[in-house]
Amino acid sequence: MTRLTLPFICECLLFFVPLNIYVIGNDLAHGVQWALFRYQQSYLGNSLILIHKDLLYVADGILRGSSAYSTILWITGAVLLVAAVIALGIAAVRRTTCLVRPAGILTVTCGVLFFAAMIVEYGPTLANSHGSSIPVGVPLILVTGFWLVAGDFDAGEGSTGVEGVDEGETGDSTE
């Protein structure tokens, strides 16, 4: 396992972390939201709403106002999270660290966008007459992003970064 496999795996696992637990109105509906979909229970039944459906709801005018703005922010964050995973996948395959920091910046940005989407929908206290929200997974996204930005994912200590050549072996025969 290379040093870039762990960041890639951690980034992929972010898609399985519930990011938001919410209540709409006075218990009209309850739901859990992941990056690419949400599960919602209401008096109309249970629903699995994929992100492309949310985009269609905004485009068709079903969602308006703060709900539409919130959905647009969420979709933008989801797209950035997918882009960060793709960048880390490319970095892991090519065994180069040049894409790790940009992927971290994308991850932090999508965490901020997810949180901003909740603030737009429910206000700065994350609770209003429309409902309430608990950002359970967003801090994990931010921590992962900052870890990618600040982490040292270059070749480990005792290595020059060139395969088969340790610091003690320089290729010189000047002994």
Image (tube, rainbow, N blue to C red):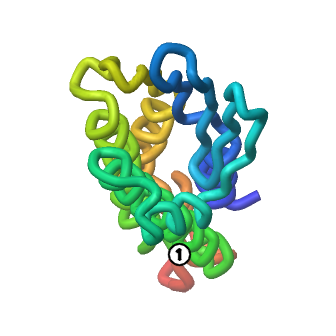
In the displayed structure, would residue 97 be above or below residue 54?
below
Query: Is residue 153 found left or right of 67 in the rendered image?
Result: right
Relative image position of residue 9 (x, y in whole percent) = 69, 52
Q: Which residue is mark 1?
A: 96
Could you classify mark 1 by the number of other residues whose Cα lies within 10 Å: few (under 14), some (14-19), or many (20 or more)? some
Q: Residue at x 60, y 66 (%)?
A: 52
Q: Quadrant of the N terminus?
A: bottom right
Q: Secondary structure at mark 1?
A: loop
Residue type marked 1: Thr
Q: Nearer the viewer, residue 80 or 125?
A: 125
Answer above or below: position of 163 versus 40: below
Q: Which residue lies at the image location 52% right of the left edge and 22% below the top edge?
A: 23
Left or right? Give the position of 44 relative to 20.
right
| Quarter assignment of residue 44 | top right
Give the x, y percent position of residue 144: 48, 42
How far across and how far down the image is residue 3, in percent?
A: 62, 57
Q: Is residue 141 left or right of residue 124?
A: right
| Furthest-top residue in this view | 26
Residue in view at x 56 percent, y 84 percent:
171
